[in-house]
Image: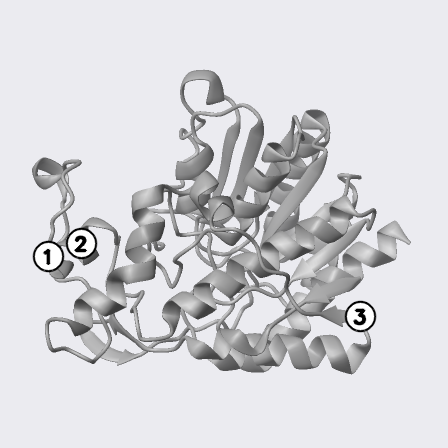
């Protein structure tokens, strides 16, 4: 299996507001480096650099004004005399919500963010853009005839919606790849999200569409970030009704319960018969992950890969979360090994 990776991910790191304290982000460069090292250690396959893609690929999944904001936010922030991480101060919640974009950077940050966990720094855009290009390169490899590919993206993407960032995510790498497949002629694409946290951004982007089936297994939103999405009754809207499937699972979910939910999800995916399957590969379902509360063991991730293989279509794995750095490489590669063992 090809792995697409770039050292450019190290251009992004910063702080987050967590537990009422400004502290270094859990989403650190060591995450991707640990997975990369594991890929090399086990000889998973060839590691390639990402290709460059036009920004229209990002706009197709997001919006022109949102992508433009990400490109220019740091310059606008610095123009105010501030050189520390740019984080939002106020959000347009409930009756404050509207479509008018503030002209001042502090307002823009709130308008285009869901939390204070996604800092923008001097080199964030470079890392974010490259991360999306990694996913697009993985899709290109599949278009060229490969059965699967691993896009080792960082920063992750599945919390980034059409017009907002959050949860360490800026551009939605998985959604951008799925949309690119549609743009290039695919009629049916599916996104399966196995990250512990609900992929609210991917759901937002495809919620009213029937050409992309979104399926997510995650911690129940009443007690799990991002809290405000991921309920089972969220099934899509308009022509997209029935094409959004959520499997919220309780605290302390073990492999037996997780496997049953994933088996059901994979049967739904088989019925949809996608031409391409995109996996939002988060491994923060691991028992020792510091910001999650499932109880999967490292060997259980092999089983995840085996079940994904049963869907039986070309598959792009896109790296999302996982914050127990010592095991993140083992767990991510175990999924890929499990997949390959059933597809070889």
Image quarter for residue 197?
Answer: bottom left
For label 3, the residue is 46
In the rendered image, residue 333, in percent from the top left (x then y), is placed at 71, 68
**Residue placed most toward the observer, 38 or 1:** 1
For label 1, the residue is 104
Q: Is residue 163 above or below residue 320?
A: above
In the rendered image, the quadrant that contains the N terminus is bottom right
Give the spatial CA distance, label 2 vs label 3: 41 Å
Label 3: few (<14), some (14–19) or many (≥20) C-alpha neighbours in 10 Å: few
Judge left or right: residue 128 versus residue 66: right
Give the spatial CA distance, label 3 vs label 1: 46 Å
* Residue drawn 12% across the image and 60% down it: 106
Give the spatial CA distance, label 1 vs label 2: 6 Å
* Residue drawn 16% across the image and 44% down it: 101
Label 2: few (<14), some (14–19) or many (≥20) C-alpha neighbours in 10 Å: many
Judge left or right: residue 162 versus residue 282: left
For label 2, the residue is 108
Q: Is residue 319 above or below residue 28?
A: above
């Amino acid at each position: 299996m090809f792995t697409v990776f770039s050292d450019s991910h190290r251009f992004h790191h910063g702080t987050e507001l967590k537990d009422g304290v400004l502290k270094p982000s859990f989403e650190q460069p060591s995450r991707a480096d640990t997975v990369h090292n594991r890929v090399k250690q086990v000889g998973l396959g060839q590691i390639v650099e990402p290709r460059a893609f036009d920004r229209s690929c990002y706009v197709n999944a997001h919006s022109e004004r949102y992508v433009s904001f990400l490109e220019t936010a740091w310059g606008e922030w610095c123009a105010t005399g501030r050189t520390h991480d740019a984080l939002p101060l106020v959000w347009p919640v409930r009756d404050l919500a509207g479509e008018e974009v503030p002209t001042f950077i502090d307002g823009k940050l709130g308008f285009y963010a869901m939390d204070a966990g996604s800092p923008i720094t001097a080199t964030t855009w470079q890392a974010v853009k490259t991360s999306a290009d990694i996913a697009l390169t993985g899709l290109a490899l599949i278009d060229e005839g490969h059965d699967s590919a691993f896009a080792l993206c960082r920063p992750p993407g599945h919390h980034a919606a059409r017009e907002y960032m959050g949860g360490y995510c800026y551009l939605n790498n998985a959604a951008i790849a799925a949309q690119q497949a549609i743009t290039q002629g695919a009629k049916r694409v599916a996104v399966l999200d196995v990250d512990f946290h609900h992929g609210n951004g991917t759901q937002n982007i495809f919620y009213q569409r029937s050409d992309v089936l979104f399926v997510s297994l995650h911690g129940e939103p009443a007690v799990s970030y991002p809290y405000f999405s991921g309920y089972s009754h969220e099934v899509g809207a308009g022509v997209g009704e029935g094409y959004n499937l959520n499997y919220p699972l309780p605290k302390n979910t073990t492999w037996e319960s997780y496997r049953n939910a994933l088996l059901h999800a994979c049967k739904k995916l088989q019925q949809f018969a996608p031409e391409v399957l995109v996996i939002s590969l988060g491994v923060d379902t691991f028992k020792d992950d510091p910001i999650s509360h499932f109880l999967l063991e490292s060997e259980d991730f092999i089983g995840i890969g085996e079940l994904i293989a049963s869907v039986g279509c070309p598959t792009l794995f896109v790296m999302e979360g996982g914050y127990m750095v010592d095991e993140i490489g083992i767990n991510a590669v175990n999924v890929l090994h499990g997949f390959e063992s059933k597809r070889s």
